[in-house]
């Protein structure tokens, strides 16, 4: 059984087909990169899997279970965690709090024990803080950033905060929406190294990128999307030689 | 956390001392302030934590107040049962309207809750067989717990503040816990909230139910203290004043309520003196407060403190600097 199976997924926005009968699957511990020029439907794919947008047609299965009809928060509870292309840190909260909210899925205390601040509530808060601090350091943020408002951090650091927020819930599947976009060379190098380390930890993720070179070294399998259609799938080496994939990218450069 | 408990203890001690010193009339005022604190805590949770606008808090107060008034006066049930009934009614009402209106956001939510406040106003005045119309309900018995009857102001003063403090502690605790963190996430970004597994609708509705419970309790205590329930207690103006005071006090801080509640108590008197100019001041406040005071008096104090701190840093360049 695959961890994630996407079957004939179609998404129309009015008359525009953002995804057209798109199928693929992901196994545990596998790293998949979805690449393609801007507007190819990459972010739409994530938004449909996580139910920000409902699918027009097709099925998404997670661990064999059809999650197409589930609500966004239920999909997250099942263990699908994501980051956003346009960084969405909560800028008035501190950096640490931003990571702490990722623990919602793995914690349990309810309303009435919170009112009374029972010992287990205190214990949970301590645990969540410790864990979040661990992930804050894991993604390479500075300890002193923990109490700063997230909005005070530079863009690249906020991307790391978001990654830590997604990681802290120990997701079974991670969806990374353009983690390298908007980063400078140093930050991009750091992100690549970080993903390399995470891979050794046995995480599973799908990565959306339009920078080909960023994904080539770090993926098991690459899927090329263009205008909502899958035009190629294979190992990075195969994709490098695939004429259609190259054409799609040459096309993009023509526009640029 | 300890510093918050100490702060509360200090406030409690001051209020306890005041209960021996102040004349009865001032104690009455402080009872009302305690009841406003209770209502305003509801705003801290709904506006401050969750970031949602509610312009009908007086409706929940009315439900609590009239709920207990009707069943204690007409059916002679004990006051404690009446108050519980009022609070449960408030919670149920919050659940029902929450399921309907909480899919709305910002202005649309404000308008919907405004409509509820208007309907409440009309019902309290017009549904005479139930509410007694303009003359309200009189002869509401004082609160009695066992043999202890809270008839005099001094006793009620103690009761009201103890309840307000418990309510305040609950809100403080909630703000730190997983539940409160979920509410704050919703305030920050609903899409992020659902992406980490927070059921946004469920949490919003629950937050409204808590807010409704606080307001209904406040309203119920108020009518038992006054011995009567009048539409004027729960007018639309009251709802406006509550949210304005909540913003002024600094809705995102639990300490704001202690600044906001006196405002809520004294502002109507001030308005009374203004006569016809009242509406102008009202309108100005409504525009200026959200524009410049979104973080309220607490925010203002913090900003000032920060400015003073910065000046001090400038004067002593060897001191700690703020890393850019």
Image (cartoon, coloured by chain):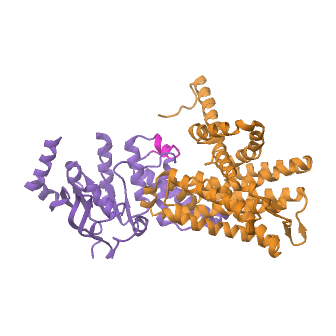
User: x, y percentage for residue A1?
Assistant: 27, 76
In this view, B294 is above or below A165:
above
The answer to whether residue B277 is visible is: yes
Judging depth in this view, the residue of A114 and B222 nearest the camera is B222
- Magenta residue check for A214: no
Residue B39 x, y percent position in the rendering: 70, 55
Query: Residue A218 occupies which quadrant of the picture?
Result: bottom left
Res A120 visible: no
The answer to whether B240 appears left or right of A209 in the picture is right
Residues shaded magenta: A142-152
* Residue B215, horizontal then vertical, whole percent: 69, 59
With respect to residue B19, does A128 lie above or below?
Answer: below
Q: Chain A is drawn in which colour?
A: purple
- B302 sits left or right of A92 in the view: right
Q: In this view, does B225 lie to the left or right of A211?
A: right
Tell whether position A144 is magenta: yes
In the rendered image of the structure, the colour used to display chain B is orange
Foreground of the two, B233 or A44: B233
Relative height, residue A220 to residue A94 (above, below)? below
Name the one closer to the observer, B12 or A169: B12
- Residue B62 % position (x, y): 71, 61
Q: For residue A53, what is the image quadrant?
A: bottom left
């Amino acid at each position: 059984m695959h961890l994630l199976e996407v079957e004939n997924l179609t998404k129309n926005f009015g008359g525009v087909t953002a995804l057209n009968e798109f199928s693929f699957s992901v196994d545990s511990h596998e790293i998949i990169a979805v690449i393609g020029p801007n507007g190819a439907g990459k972010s739409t794919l994530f938004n449909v899997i996580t139910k920000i947008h409902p699918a027009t047609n097709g099925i998404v299965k997670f661990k064999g279970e059809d999650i197409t009809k589930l609500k966004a928060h239920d999909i997250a509870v099942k263990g699908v965690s994501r980051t956003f292309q346009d960084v969405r840190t909560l800028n008035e909260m501190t950096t640490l709090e931003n990571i702490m909210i990722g623990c919602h899925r793995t914690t349990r205390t309810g309303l009435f024990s919170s009112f009374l601040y029972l010992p287990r509530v205190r214990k949970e808060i301590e645990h969540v803080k410790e864990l979040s601090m661990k992930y804050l350091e894991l993604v390479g943020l500075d300890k002193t950033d923990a109490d700063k408002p997230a909005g005070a951090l530079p863009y690249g650091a906020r991307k790391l905060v978001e990654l830590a927020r997604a990681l802290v819930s120990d997701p079974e599947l991670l969806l990374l929406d353009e983690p390298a976009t908007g980063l400078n060379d140093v930050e991009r190098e750091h992100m690549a190294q970080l993903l390399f380390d995470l891979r050794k930890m046995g995480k599973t993720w799908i990565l959306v990128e339009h920078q080909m070179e960023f994904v080539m070294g770090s993926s098991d399998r690459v899927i090329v999307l263009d205008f909502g259609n899958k035009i190629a799938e294979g190992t990075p080496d195969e994709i490098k030689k695939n004429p259609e994939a190259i054409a799609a990218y040459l096309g993009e450069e023509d526009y640029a | 956390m300890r510093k918050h408990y100490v702060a509360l203890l200090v406030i409690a001690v001051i209020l306890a001392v005041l209960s021996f010193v102040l004349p009865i009339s001032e104690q009455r005022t402080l009872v009302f302030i305690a009841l406003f604190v209770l209502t305003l805590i509801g705003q801290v949770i709904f506006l401050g934590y969750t970031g949602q606008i509610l312009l009908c808090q007086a409706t929940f107060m009315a439900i609590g107040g009239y709920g207990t008034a009707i069943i204690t006066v007409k059916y002679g049930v004990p006051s404690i049962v009446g108050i519980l009934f009022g609070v449960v009614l408030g919670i149920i009402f919050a659940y029902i309207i929450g399921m309907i209106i909480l899919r709305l956001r910002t202005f649309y939510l404000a308008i919907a809750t405004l409509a509820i406040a208007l309907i409440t106003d009309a019902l309290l005045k017009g549904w005479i067989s139930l509410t007694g119309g303009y003359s309200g309900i009189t002869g509401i018995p004082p609160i009695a717990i066992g043999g202890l009857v809270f008839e005099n102001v001094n006793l009620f003063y103690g009761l009201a503040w103890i309840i307000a403090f418990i309510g305040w502690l609950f809100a403080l605790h909630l703000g730190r816990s997983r539940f409160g963190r979920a509410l704050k996430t919703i305030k920050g970004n609903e899409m992020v909230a659902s992406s980490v597994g927070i059921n946004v609708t469920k949490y919003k509705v629950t937050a409204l139910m808590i807010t409704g419970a606080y307001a209904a309790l406040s309203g119920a205590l108020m009518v038992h203290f006054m011995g009567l329930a009048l539409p004027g207690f729960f007018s639309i103006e009251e709802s406006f004043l509550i949210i304005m005071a909540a913003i002024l006090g600094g809705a995102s801080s639990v300490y704001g309520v202690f600044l906001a509640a006196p405002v809520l108590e004294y502002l109507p008197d001030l308005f009374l003196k203004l006569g016809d100019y009242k509406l102008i001041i009202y309108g100005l406040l409504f525009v200026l407060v959200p524009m410049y005071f979104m973080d309220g008096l607490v925010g203002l104090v913090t900003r000032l403190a920060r400015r003073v701190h910065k000046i001090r840093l400038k004067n002593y360049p060897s001191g700690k600097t703020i890393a850019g």
